[in-house]
């Protein structure tokens, strides 16, 4: 029978519940247990696909085309497992499905209420994920902070679920903050006590307490937390601030958290196999070299907007025992081409990531031009590839005025156009080309050599594509279209093989990178950057 772990958070938001859930998943995997992780988000949006990155950070895309919370990226990277639509559930999706059932008459005339109809729908999502993956352990993270009105239906649903499946089959892990007061030199436990009391008022007694803290937890405070929160002493786990999120699984393992969970759930304890993870963390903590990579975008004030890109660059660095420093460049600062030299002169590589809208586009084009003209290793992602095509068309292929119809309805040369399948699409949520699609790479190309194969599968999230009417003209000028969809209708990869590394792709390779398995395109970029340095 699948065992369930519910992860909640209290005191403040952004405690790192997602990293705790992902780390616990990693520890289960190290013991050869299968595990899945679900994220329940209390906002009313159906998914984060239409939300500004400034509001919610990156939108993570799964193989099956789900636009999900960025925590799904952490789940996949830590557990090396591909998840999907069923792994991210929002209040909006729950309410939408309940209302659809009511309109169809599925409730046989009953008054539709939060209890039992909304809570039953939430529980059905838990069961559906379990049936799909059939894991040994199923971790469910509840978004938000205990006390929020928005998350109450989810809290009530997991209270019901725990009682329905019986004692010993589910536990609750509550994450809290232990603030440190410098004036008294103390860690304060009262906020955590109050948070647990609020959780208890909803009918849930946590079995494990994970305390985010900047200082070690003294014995007296640990005993106080155990006493007043009614958890065993060995179930009070400290989660210290760390330089790398990949240190967290080892820190939790050192305190025996996974063993405590396994014991509470009546499962067999197994010897963890963490050698490879320990080796990874050793490389992270003891780099032999360092490089600086620029990310030129328009959401640079919030690094979470590009979190998978950042992590993928770091993964590639780990493989070479190198630390990667990120230099954030607001593309709007590069609208004047003369600024590119001063902004990019101290970096060894540059990435132009995905995005939407015309703001900052001319700056991205200038960044790409600077990289091309100065043989600065470059990687373009989604919109970054479209910009690379526009820049090359304008400045090399002689197509002055080339642009995308996303930014100019009537460009002189529409080298980027709306996809044919998107012409009659109405609405924005979930309507793009989404999820995993095959791509065929040209034999002997830079991309094919990086992947080590000629047929790949990558995740997409876009509406616009290279206009096939201009491919021949741009190709004649030297830009190689080295990756195409199986039917040859969609340009997927472009490159300039005469440069050290100039590759851009229509898909999002950052979604498939893993800390111990860097993505080939990011690895190629970092290798070229190290060689340049």
Image (cartoon, rainbow, N blue to C red):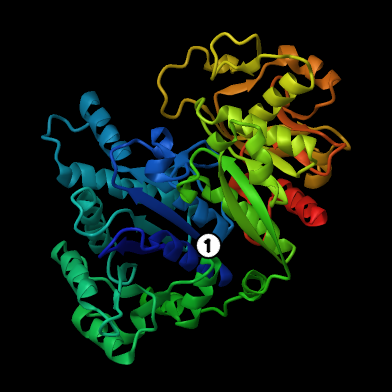
Residue 515 visible to the viewer: yes
Please name the residue shown 62% across and 73% down the image: 285
Q: How many labels does the image show?
A: 1
**Image position of 121 with respect to 253: above or below:** above
Label 1 element class:
loop
Please name the residue shown 65% across and 28% down the image: 387
Residue 519: give x, y in percent of width and height: 69, 50
Closest to the observer: 315 or 123?
315
**Image position of 232 with respect to 29: above or below:** below
- Quadrant showing the C terminus: bottom right
Residue 459: give x, y in percent of width and height: 60, 38
Q: Residue furthest bottom?
A: 219
Q: In this view, does 313 lie to the left or right of 114?
A: right
- Quadrant showing the N terminus: bottom left
Closest to the observer: 139 or 467?
467
Q: In which quarter of the image is residue 379?
A: top right
**Image position of 189 with respect to 462: above or below:** below
Please name the residue shown 56% across and 49% down the image: 308
- Which residue position holds label 1? 34
Q: In this view, does 152 lie to the left or right of 423?
A: left
Please name the residue shown 71% across and 14% down the image: 400
Residue 131: give x, y in percent of width and height: 43, 50
Residue 512: give x, y in percent of width and height: 62, 48
**Image position of 466 with respect to 184: above or below:** above
């Amino acid at each position: 029978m699948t065992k369930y772990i519910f992860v909640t958070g209290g005191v403040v938001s952004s405690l790192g519940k997602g990293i705790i859930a992902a780390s616990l998943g990693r520890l289960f995997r190290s013991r050869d247990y299968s595990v899945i992780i679900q994220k329940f988000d209390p906002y009313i949006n159906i998914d984060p696909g239409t939300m500004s990155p400034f509001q919610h950070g990156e939108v993570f895309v799964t193989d099956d085309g789900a636009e999900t919370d960025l925590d799904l990226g952490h789940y996949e990277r830590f557990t090396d497992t591909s998840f999907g639509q069923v792994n991210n559930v929002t209040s909006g999706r729950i309410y939408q499905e309940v209302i659809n059932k009511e309109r169809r008459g599925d409730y046989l005339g009953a008054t539709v209420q939060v209890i039992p109809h909304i809570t039953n729908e939430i529980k059905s999502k838990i069961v559906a994920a379990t049936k799909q993956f059939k894991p040994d352990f199923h971790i469910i993270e509840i978004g938000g902070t205990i006390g929020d009105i928005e998350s109450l239906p989810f809290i009530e649903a997991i209270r019901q679920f725990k009682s329905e499946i019986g004692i010993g089959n589910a536990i609750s892990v509550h994450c809290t903050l232990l603030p440190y007061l410098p004036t008294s030199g103390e860690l304060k436990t009262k906020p955590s006590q109050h948070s647990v009391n609020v959780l208890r008022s909803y009918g849930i007694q946590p079995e494990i307490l994970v305390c985010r803290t900047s200082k070690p937890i003294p014995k007296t405070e640990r005993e106080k937390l155990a006493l007043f929160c009614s958890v065993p002493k060995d179930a009070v786990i400290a989660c210290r601030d760390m330089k790398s999120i990949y240190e967290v699984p080892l820190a939790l393992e050192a305190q025996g958290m996974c063993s405590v969970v396994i014991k509470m759930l009546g499962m067999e304890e197994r010897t963890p196999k963490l050698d490879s993870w320990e080796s990874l963390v050793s490389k992270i903590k003891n780099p032999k070299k360092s490089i600086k990579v620029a990310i030129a975008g328009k959401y640079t004030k919030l690094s979470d907007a590009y979190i998978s890109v950042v992590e993928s660059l770091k993964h590639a660095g780990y493989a070479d025992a190198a630390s990667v420093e990120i230099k954030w460049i607001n593309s709007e600062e590069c609208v004047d081409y003369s600024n590119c030299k001063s902004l990019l002169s101290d970096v060894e590589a540059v990435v132009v990531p995905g995005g939407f809208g015309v703001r900052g586009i001319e700056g991205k084009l200038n960044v790409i031009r600077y990289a091309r003209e100065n043989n600065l290793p470059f990687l373009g992602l989604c919109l970054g590839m479209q910009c690379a095509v526009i820049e090359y068309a304008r400045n090399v292929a002689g197509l002055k005025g080339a642009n995308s119809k996303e930014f100019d309805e009537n460009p002189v040369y529409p080298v980027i156009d709306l996809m044919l399948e998107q012409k009659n699409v109405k609405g924005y949520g979930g309507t793009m080309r989404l999820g995993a699609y095959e791509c065929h790479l040209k034999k002997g190309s830079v991309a094919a050599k990086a992947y080590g194969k000629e047929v790949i599968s990558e995740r997409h999230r876009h509406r616009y594509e290279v206009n096939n009417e201009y491919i021949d003209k741009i190709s004649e000028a030297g830009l190689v279209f080295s990756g195409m969809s199986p039917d040859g209708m969609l340009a997927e990869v472009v490159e300039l093989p005469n440069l050290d590394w100039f590759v851009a792709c229509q898909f999002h390779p950052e979604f498939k990178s893993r800390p111990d398995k860097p993505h080939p395109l990011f690895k190629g970029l970092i290798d070229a950057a190290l060689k340049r340095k």
